[in-house]
Image: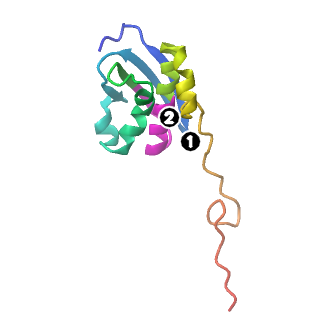
C-alpha cells in the first residue's frame, strides 16, 4: 500500500474508543494498528460490523482500510472503526449520505458507562437488604 497516494479520512468514536480511519483505493485489506484485522479482533461478527458501511454502499473490495484505534474495549473500538469508515466514505462520495444516514451509521453512539455512585456497588446496584 502506497502511503503517498490519496486517501479519505474519517474519525470515529464509540464509548471511550477513538478511531482514525483512512480509506485508500484498493482491494479490501483491513489493517488496524499496523496488524491485520483478524489478528487484532479475530474473525467473527466484528468483521461484519466493520464492513457494514461498505456493504450498505456497495463499495466492498474497493478500498483498503488503515485504522489507528485507542481507548475503550473491543466492541467500542469496532464501533469506532465503523463510524470512522462511514465518515470517510462521505468524503469519497457525498451522495452516499442518505444511504448511510438511513442505516444510522453517521450518528455517533453517545452511550457511555455511567459513573459509580457512593454507597452503591456499581452505578445502580445496591447492597442487598437484610431484614433479619
| Residue closest to the eye, 18 or 79 | 79
Q: Which residue corresponds to the image point at 48% horizontal and 30% vertical from the top-left?
A: 19
Q: Secondary structure at mark 1?
A: loop
Residue 115, position in %: x, y?
66, 53
Circle number at residue 122: none
Instruction: Identify the magenta region.
Output: 67-83
Mark 2, residue position: 80
Q: Tell me the quarter of the image containing the N terminus.
A: top left
Q: How many marks?
A: 2
- The reply to whether the C-beta atoms of the residues labelled 2 and 1 are less than 8 Å apart is yes
Instruction: Name the residue furthest bottom.
Output: 132
Q: Which residue corresponds to the image point at 38% horizontal and 38% vertical from the top-left?
A: 48
Q: Which residue corresponds to the image point at 29% horizontal and 37% vertical from the top-left?
A: 38
Compared with residue 104, is residue 119 higher up or lower down, i.e. above or below?
Answer: below
Residue 91, position in %: x, y?
52, 15
Residue 26, position in %: x, y?
31, 16
Mark 1, residue position: 15
Residue 76, position in %: x, y?
49, 42
- Quadrant for residue 35, please give it: top left
- Quadrant for residue 65, please give it: top left
Is 94 on the left-hand or right-hand side of 25? right
Q: Secondary structure at mark 2?
A: helix
Q: How many C-alpha atoms fall within 10 Å of the one at disc 2: few (<14), some, or many (≥20)? A: many
Can residue 34 be seen by looking at this rendering?
A: no
Q: Tell me the quarter of the image containing the C terminus.
A: bottom right
Amino acid at each position: 500500500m502506497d502511503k503517498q497516494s490519496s486517501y479519505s479520512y474519517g474519525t470515529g468514536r464509540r464509548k471511550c474508543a477513538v478511531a482514525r480511519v483512512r480509506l485508500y483505493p484498493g482491494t479490501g485489506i483491513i489493517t488496524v494498528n499496523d496488524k491485520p484485522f483478524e489478528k487484532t479482533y479475530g474473525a467473527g461478527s466484528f468483521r461484519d460490523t466493520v464492513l457494514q458501511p461498505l456493504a450498505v454502499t456497495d463499495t466492498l473490495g474497493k478500498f483498503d482500510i488503515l485504522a489507528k484505534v485507542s481507548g475503550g474495549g473491543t466492541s467500542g473500538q469496532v464501533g469506532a472503526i465503523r463510524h470512522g469508515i462511514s465518515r470517510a466514505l462521505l468524503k469519497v462520495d457525498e451522495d452516499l449520505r442518505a444511504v448511510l444516514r438511513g442505516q444510522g451509521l453517521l450518528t455517533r453512539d453517545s452511550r457511555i458507562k455511567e459513573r459509580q455512585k457512593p454507597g452503591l456497588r456499581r452505578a445502580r446496584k445496591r447492597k442487598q437488604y437484610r431484614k433479619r
